[in-house]
Image (cartoon, rainbow, N blue to C red):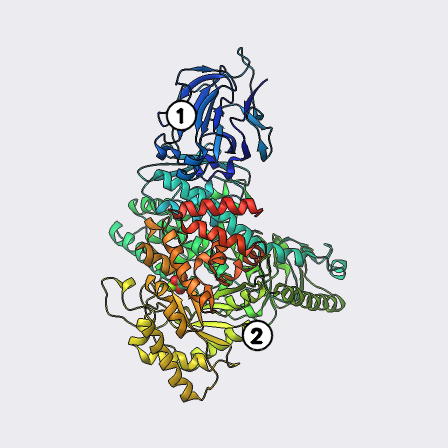
Amino acid sequence: MSILQILAPFDGWCSALDEVPDPVFAGRMLGDGLAIDPTSGILIAPCAGEIITLPASAHAVSIRTAEGIDVLIHVGIDTVQLGGRGFDAQVRPGAIVRAGDELIHFDLDIVARGAKSLMTPIVVTTMDGLSLRQVRSPGMVSAGEVLFEIAGIATAAGIKTSTQPPRAAAPPNETAVGQTLIVNLRQGLHARPAALLAQRAKSFRAQASLRAHGRSANARSVVAIMALGVRQGDELSIQASGTDAAQAVASLVAGIEEALRMESAAGHGAAASRKTAAAPLGSVELYSTPGPGVLAGVIAVPGVAVGRATRIERREIVVAENGAGLGRESAQLEQARVHVRARLERIAATGGATRREIIGAHLEFLDDPQVNEAATEFLVAGKSAGFAWRAAIRRSIGALQALEDLRLRERVDDLLDVESHVLLALAGEARPMNIPLPEQAVLVAEDLLPSELTALDGARLVAICLSGGGATSHVAILAAAMDIPMLVGLGAGIRDIANGATVIVDADAGTLQMAPTAAAIEQARAAVEARLMRRAKTQAEAQTECRALDGTRVEVFANLGNVIDAAAAVANGAEGCGLLRTEFLFIDRDTAPAEAEQLAAYQDIAAALGPRPLILRLMDVGGDKPLRYLPLPAEENPALGLRGVRTALARPDLLRTQLRAALRVQPAGKVRLLVPMITDVAEILAVRGVIDEIKAEIGIRDPIELGAMIETPAAALMASGLVREVDFLSIGSNDLTQYTLAMDRGHPELAGRTDALHPAVLKLVAAAASAGVAADKMVAVCGGVAADRLAVPILLGLGVRELSVVPAAVPAIKRQIRSLRINDCQELAMHCLGLASAGEVRASVAQTIGLWGDTR
Ligand code: PEP
Ligand code: MG
């Protein structure tokens, strides 16, 4: 084995390639190496060899060593655009140079002013079979010092000669249609990340595929991705071909990062609760050792419960094998899928974040190209719609069951769930909801599907015990979100439990006591009580207010859709509700909700929030949120039509009913009102007028806080006038991005580009925020960007002091804010406002917070 040393080509600050603000280099798509931010303008040869490429612009050079290893030095990022300005080549292509020979002179000032970054990658572009040993750690380095070493397999020439044909180092982006990475997701590419990737892949024209373990998968198919069996630490290669191939690859890589963020956000909640729950309960362990009358299982959700064994039976759905003609059967299957999709979407819209995510994965299964192609095959072969659907699903299940990875095998339940939804729809039925349970029910079953769990009366369910099942199945994730202790894999022994028998579930120790003594029951009940008290204390600690590193107060609120979300928000430490999407409370119905019904719903949420404020957004109807009971005239372009406050003012009856309900929520003053889709101050004045009338009608004297949503460029630009008429501003970045970039927020092919970090959107956020700051009024952000960790420092730097995010994201956002200094954020925000694209903003923030020491 021989070693080749690569020297620093100039003086400067050495750092890892990850710091380079260009995904091609940072992602090592051109090769591995290091980067230097130069402090001198003389580039010397990092090794001896032949100059292979040195373009006329002289911004980059590559050298091939005698051993056939190619080293590329690319001075700065995007310096090709300088067209040679500031660069002076000292050698020509073909020249033979020694290490240390001068290759290029460049003017640091000119290049720094004209380039995106001076950061210079020094990479080995022919790494085949070679390994790199980093010699320099980050810090100052002088020209000629050893940067890193290349170790190669010994050949006659000493170092393995590259098997690649001679090739010039290609400029970044032109060859960017593939990237290989290591998947760092704790649970590998399981259903949710797979769904996320498939969704992204579908928004590009390019044909994208994923390769791992020598197999390839269509990136649009969740099932195919999962069937790759990618686990943590596995190498995954993403490839795409077609016009937007590079964007597709970048988007898929970003999808994996997003999955990582989601995993850490979810892990924070789930893992933390697991830790708390896993704290030894001492006395409980004394009586829960496996033995006679005690079954041992796998802990899916920790906790302890005492309750009555309750069995539920699953009805087998029978389907005929033969169909009544291809046309008829395919139409029926399509109709059933449409019906199930609408139903799942409705359930998702009214459920908590976990439920929404899991249903999102089910929706992906419903539309999965591989499953649907298989179903078509069976239909063409003359089978009935039900038979074809079941056979297609079972084929995918077969592929999953063949995998070694237990977690992927557990996705079988989700496929079965989607299978049963469609089969029930074909039979003209729907799964019954709110199935009654006895008080303190311990559900005992062979297995359980996610939709079967959500159909049960959760308030009476204290534990779940399954003879089969998996610890990371979606039903277990749902149970964790509902905080219901759960044991799986208890085996056939649970058949011996009599319906109604009192049992003790010790899901900390992994045991189920089938016939406990009275003393054991009493002891277990005391343990449950102690646990509840401990949890109350933990939750109280999570309520501490949030301050940045320099002491600046920043409120972290949660966006809510219903009372379940409210409970999750409180548990996660949200300091209030920054956005109650009231339209979601009454979405799935044919009649408008009466005042009493609305009041009851708002009051429940207010009660769940305890002393925390509740910002209640007036119904945001129209556009992408139609209501069945409020048929709006057909519009050519609903996103630009009657929606938000426009609908409210056009239907004063609905507005008045909602306001009467909202203003009667107790305690008085808890509810603050937020008006959606504002474009000018007249709309605020009109709503304020109605509020004043209703206050007079119901005898309220105290002021009611009123806020305007900044969701249109008009509102952002007019914010200084608006803010005079309101008590606070809340920036709805989802719509603000849509209207600023003229890109439908739901458009699948534009999904990768509707980015709230586009500098145009940031400029509007800056305009609104500075108007709020000047008027000394609170400026909040309640759109999705508030939970984007690359956005948080920019938003704080622009003057935003309240972020409202999905409940599960609260802890992570609080943690991030506590690590930030507002002065640094201001500097970063100002810099980002001058950048040219959302990609540049993201790269710049990633690099900067990396330097600040953000370790997540
Ligand atoms: C927004 O537009 O950012 C917002 C918070 O409102 P919604 O997503 O409900 O339209
Ligand atoms: Mg909106």
The furthest residue to the top: 156
Q: Which SS class for mark 1?
A: strand
Does residue 775 sit above or below 763 in this rendering? below
Dot 2, how many residues are within 10 Å of its Cα: few (below 14), some (14-19), or many (20+)? few
Disc 2 versus disc 1: distance between alpha carbons? 68 Å
Q: Is residue 678 left or right of residue 467?
A: left
Q: Is residue 323 left or right of residue 525?
A: left
Residue of label 2: 611
Q: Position of residue 57 (x, y in %)?
A: 36, 28
Q: Residue at x 73, y 69 (%)?
A: 522
Residues marked 2 and 1 touching at CB (< 8 Å) = no
- What is the quadrant of the N terminus in the image? top right
Q: Position of residue 296 (x, y in %)?
A: 67, 53
Residue of label 1: 88
Q: Is residue 304 left or right of residue 327?
A: right
Q: Toward the viewer: 855 or 240?
A: 855
- Name the kind of residue labelled 2 in the image: Pro
Q: Nearer the viewer, mark 2 or mark 1?
A: 1
Please report whichever mark, 2 or 1, sits nearer to the chain's N-terminal start.
1
Q: How many marks?
A: 2
Q: Position of residue 222 (x, y in %)?
A: 42, 46
Residue 528: which numbered mark, if any? none
Q: Which SS class for mark 2?
A: loop
Does residue 375 sit above or below 810 in this rendering? above
- Name the kind of residue labelled 1 in the image: Asp
Dot 1, how many residues are within 10 Å of its Cα: few (below 14), some (14-19), or many (20+)? some
Judged from the image, the quadrant occupied by ligand 1 is: bottom left
Q: Toward the viewer: 704 or 611?
A: 704
Q: Toward the viewer: 174 or 765?
A: 765
Which of the 4 image quarters holds residue 173? top left
